[in-house]
Image (spheres, grey):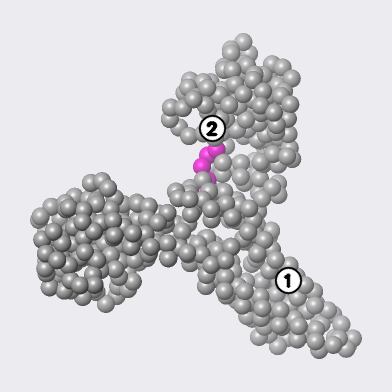
Amino acid sequence: MQATERTIFALATGAGRAAIAIIRLSGPACGVILDRLCRSKRPVARQATLRQLWLSDDLLDQALVLWFPGPRSYTGEDGAELHLHAGAAVIEAVADALVLLGAYPAEPGEFTQRAFMHGRLDLIEAEGIADLIEAETQAQRRQALRQTEGVLSTLYNDWAGRLRIVLAQQEALIDFPDEDLPPEVETGLLRELGSLAAAMATHLAAGGPGERLRRGLVFAVIGRPNVGKSSLVNALAQRDAAIVSAVAGTTRDALEIRVILGDVPVTLVDTAGLRETQDEVEAEGVRRARHHAGQADLVVRITEAGSDPEEAPEEINNVLVVCNKIDQAPAPPGTIGVSARTGAGLDTLVGILARHAQELTARSGNAPLTRARHRAGINDAAAHLALAIGAHWPEIRGEELRLAMQALGRLTGAVGVEDLLDTVFGQFCIGK
């Protein structure tokens, strides 16, 4: 049986104690399954109806049942929802009944994959749904919603449409070389290609904030041993996440703690103290600390009030210097002073870190890049455009234009994405 010929089901609500559990179904046998479960005429389309659910003579539950005949459904197929009482025994009994009636448990992302296969949404919109499910902050939610509404897809489809017109003009130049087409045709063609290339370059340059907001930022906390890095991380996280000790070298490995700063998810990385050491394990911790600092979106370098100033390692950029232990000595003028022990200055530091997080994720325009896949596709299209602009032979230019269109088509799923589908939809939760 083909995958899309199967009728699938999944629990769409989360695990744990709750009042209601929703099981979703999609596929050609949905209507028949509802008829057998309800022992009566199936509900009116898109209208919640109270029904008893039966398997033979066994009453499973009394539930709200919704019937969504295709193509006006999420997947484009016949679909249904069963709003059950959320007891584990009820869910198990209904799931077992669905299997006996011929339905199959859904794979991760299978509902949304079917929606894509039936043209209910394109690949970029599907990825937006995945991002919406994973959104931790309101900023992530707003960005994901724009993507599900087709803002990115509209932009890329517009580029593809413009390329299609240019390709048609190029084909005319190839097919009718003796028709004395006005030179303005090729001049306008090259002008449009230059405009498209500039638009792609601008989009790529502005894409970093969208990608960073989607995945969250990384702030690495570095400094010499015993300057209070772990204490400060605990204070920012508002919990005892990292071990704090007066013994130098306590932190050996990098510890990651997720916090929200300025409505942006940020992973704080508590690292080993930077110093020369003969201890093999601690030396590896120092190496990892330098690695994390080199990869971080922002490095928070902790110094100690009253100690000699220190220089950040040369390979580390984008550094914010914070002076800890101002309860013991004043911070140098012009620096950010805090006390992880007393809490002095912490509100100011949180505000500064939040501002950095917002600046690093501040988008320009309505349709920022959100994934490395999008960036790779546009880079591919832009590379073919550059080759088309520089091509001396019209046939070569035409071929490069076709390849650029294919690169844009792969972004939205219009062409050649079969090998991507398992990767894209495998990241979804089971009920979506």
Residue at position x 48%, y 67% in the image: 208
Q: Nearer the viewer, residue 270 or 290?
A: 270
SS class, disc 2: strand
Where in the figure is residue 352, as x and y percent of width and height? 33, 62
Where in the figure is residue 48, as x and y percent of width and height? 66, 26
Pointer 2 with pointer 1, Cβ within 8 A: no
> Along the polypeptide, which appears first: circle 2 or circle 1?
2
Residue 11 numbered tag? 2
Residue at position x 69%, y 39% in the image: 73
Where in the figure is residue 129, as x and y percent of width and height? 57, 48
Q: What secondary structure predominates along the stretch shown in magenta?
A: loop
Label 2 Cα crowd, 10 Å radius (few <14 / some 14-19 / many 20+): many
Where in the figure is residue 402, as x and y percent of width and height? 71, 71
Q: Nearer the viewer, residue 403 or 330?
A: 330
Magenta span contains residue 430: yes
Determine whether, in the image, residue 393 is placed left or right of residue 380: right
User: Could you say which quadrant of the image residue 79 lies in?
Assistant: top right
Determine whether, in the image, residue 22 is placed left or right of residue 359: right
Q: CA distance from mark 2 to mark 1?
A: 43 Å
Q: Is residue 101 above or below residue 288?
A: above
Q: Quadrant of the C terminus?
A: top right
| Residue 254 seen by the camera | no
Q: Magenta residues? A: 426-431
For marks 2 and 1, give the one nearer the viewer. 1
Q: Tag 2: residue type?
A: Leu
Residue 162 numbered tag? 1
